[in-house]
Image (tube, helix red, strand yellow):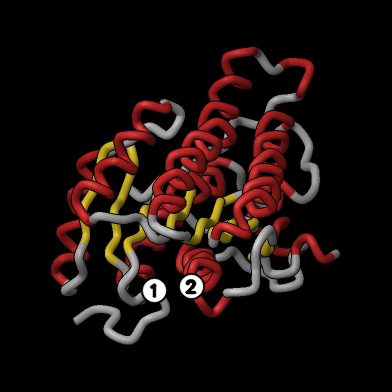
Amino acid sequence: MAGEHGLLRGRVALITGASSGIGAASARVFAREGATVVLAARREDRLRELVEELRGTGAEAAYVVTDVSRREDTRRAVGFVLERYGRLDSAFNNAGWGMGRTPLHLMDDAAYDSIMDVNARGVWNCLRDEIAAMLANGGGTIVNNSSVGGLLATPVAAPYVAAKHAVIGFTKAAAAEYAAQGIRVNAVAPGTTRSEVVADWFAQNPGIEEALHAATPQPRTAEPEEIAEAAAWLLSDRASFVTGATVPVDGGFTMV
């Protein structure tokens, strides 16, 4: 049986942005570590395929189509978890997306709104519904996916940088507010991580991957599983005295 002795054994975990990249890798890692996983994202075909894959390993998995920028969707996703499994123990608020590199003074309202709606409002929506469910269950653990862009500024990405800083602010605020009620809230801040979007970016911008490697003490691109492993640890009892923290998973990029 998958995850018989894993870090997340016996937990019910919700993962947003679970159809690809870090989210899909997290579904596999969490299931391997013993969690029952509920996958939430917008692309039902990808979710269905991943759930079938996980069930093939002996894991318990389900999915719910979700747009985290819509409060009714996050409420429905958490409601699905509660109806199907009776509780929500852990959540990885991973859904997010980047944007084309545009100077701040040329950025239009639509681009700003789309970035903030997914990356900031999406986490805000998820936190409210997840915390309500966890309070009713006596506690739980949450990890939010920020970015190295939430720890420092990068040029021509102002809304993304602002949104990822906001994720860290939400993390600290929620951790402070609910620690005494048994809810731990932390964040991961990934560096450049190999995904479909990043692979396309590399292909369209020859030399950018090498330039990023040159600026990173561990000179390579992260694999999605490496971010998932950090999130799994933070969600587990191995991190029982960690809350309000943002853990860089960036090969040392923000260290220098």
Name of the residue lying farthest toward the top = 109
User: Which image quadrant is residue 249 in?
Assistant: bottom right
Residue at position x 70%, y 73% from top?
218
The amino acid sitting under disc 2 is Ser
- Marks 1,2: beta carbons within 8 A: yes
Residue toward you, 29 or 195: 29
In this image, 251 relative to 139: left or right?
right
Residue toward you, 111 or 103: 111
Q: Give the crowd class for mark 1: few <14, some 14-19, many >=20 residues within 10 Å.
A: many
112 relative to 94, above or below: above
Residue at position x 71%, y 43% from top?
169
| Residue 207 percent location from the top left of the image | 66, 52
Image quadrant containing the N terminus:
bottom left
Residue matched to label 2? 236
- Label 1 vs 2, first from the N-terminus: 1
Q: Secondary structure at mark 2?
A: loop
User: Which image quadrant is residue 213 in?
Assistant: bottom right
Q: Is residue 223 visible?
A: no
Numbered circle sitting on residue 8: 1
Residue toward you, 248 or 223: 248
| Residue 245 percent location from the top left of the image | 69, 61
User: Which image quadrant is residue 112 in?
Assistant: top right
How far apart marks 1 and 2 lie (CA) works out to: 6 Å
The amino acid sitting under disc 1 is Leu
Residue at position x 58%, y 20% from top?
113
In this image, 25 relative to 217: left or right?
left
Name of the residue lying farthest toward the bottom = 5
In this image, 253 relative to 66: left or right?
right
Q: Is residue 85 visible?
A: yes
